[in-house]
């Protein structure tokens, strides 16, 4: 029984060692991919047996397929009234797939352009990003509900990947809902 237990423990140790080696190999490959360096992996129990991973020159060949973000569909100009639900959207294409963020463009009292990261602390605002509609594309939205006068302004869709970045701007114009209501004709309340 002791021999079987020892054999089983030895087998478990070898399996654990094998999986540890596989994890090290995968991590080494991932590290090389991101840092563009050449790594060798040698097994501790057999230092003469090393696995060589692809060199940086192979990585450079793969990089030729990479493309900086390009706005496919920019955000639009929106006009709506306070209390409404509105959204701006932005489609971006890039390789690798881009990351989209939204900012509101404001101006300081001294005329300096400021960018506020969204959604920030705004309870009436949500940001969503999804992949698509095509391969290597991302679509991002900023949803505002309910729309307030403070939401009026310029909104920037910002897209970035490891190759570059770009942005496009949309605009939201807010009309005060109470000012746009037509007054009831005289005596209309009496007819109800």
Image: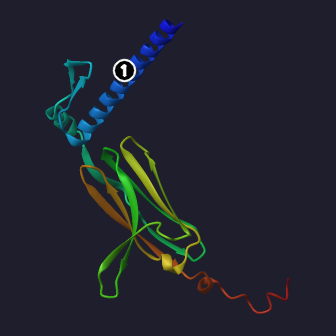
- Residue 126 sits above or below residue 179 on the image: above
Left or right of residue 4, residue 182 in this image: right
Q: Is residue 9 left or right of residue 37?
A: right
Q: Choose between 126 and 134: the one closer to the eye.
A: 126
Q: Quadrant of residue 76?
A: bottom left
The location of residue 67, given as percent across then percent down, is: 25, 46
Q: Nearer the viewer, residue 103 or 155?
A: 103
Of all residues shown, which one is farthest toward the left? 57
Colour scheme in use: rainbow
Question: How packed is label 1: few (under 14 Cα within 10 Å), some, or many (20 or more)?
Answer: few
Q: Nearer the viewer, residue 96 or 7?
A: 7
Q: Name, please, the residue furthest toward the bottom.
A: 186
Quadrant of the frame with the C terminus: bottom right
Residue drawn at x 48%, y 6% as measured from the top left: 3
Residue 175 in picture, x, y percent from top left: 53, 80
Question: Disc 1 designates what residue?
Answer: 18
| Residue at x 14%, y 34% (from the top left corner) | 57
| Position of residue 36 measured from the top left corner of the image (x, y, whole percent) | 19, 39
150 vs 101: above or below: below
User: As displayed, is residue 7 above or below residue 152?
Assistant: above
Q: Position of residue 75 (x, y in %)?
A: 41, 62
SS at circle 1: helix
Q: Residue at x 34, y 63 (%)?
A: 168
Q: Where 170 falls versus 176 (above or below)?
A: above
Quadrant containing the N terminus in the rendered view? top right
Q: Quadrant of residue 95?
A: top left
User: How many numbered dots are placed on residues in this image?
Assistant: 1
């Amino acid at each position: 029984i002791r021999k079987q237990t020892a054999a089983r423990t030895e087998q478990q140790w070898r399996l654990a060692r094998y999986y540890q080696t596989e994890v090290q190999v995968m991590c080494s490959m991932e590290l090389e991919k991101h840092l563009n360096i050449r790594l060798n992996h040698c097994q501790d129990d057999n230092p003469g047996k090393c696995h060589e991973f692809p060199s940086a020159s192979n990585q450079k060949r793969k990089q030729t397929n990479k493309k900086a973000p390009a706005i496919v569909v920019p955000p639009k100009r929106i006009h709506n009234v306070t209390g409404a639900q509105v959204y701006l959207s932005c489609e971006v294409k890039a390789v690798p797939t881009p990351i989209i963020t939204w900012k509101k463009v404001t101006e300081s009292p001294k005329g300096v352009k400021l960018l506020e990261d969204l959604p920030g602390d705004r309870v009436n605002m949500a940001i969503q990003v999804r992949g698509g509609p095509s391969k290597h594309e991302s679509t991002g939205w900023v949803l505002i509900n309910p729309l307030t006068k403070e939401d009026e302004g310029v909104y920037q869709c910002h897209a970035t990947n490891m190759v570059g970045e770009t942005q496009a701007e949309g605009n939201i114009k807010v009309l005060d809902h109470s000012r746009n209501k037509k007054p009831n004709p005289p005596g209309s309340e009496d007819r109800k």
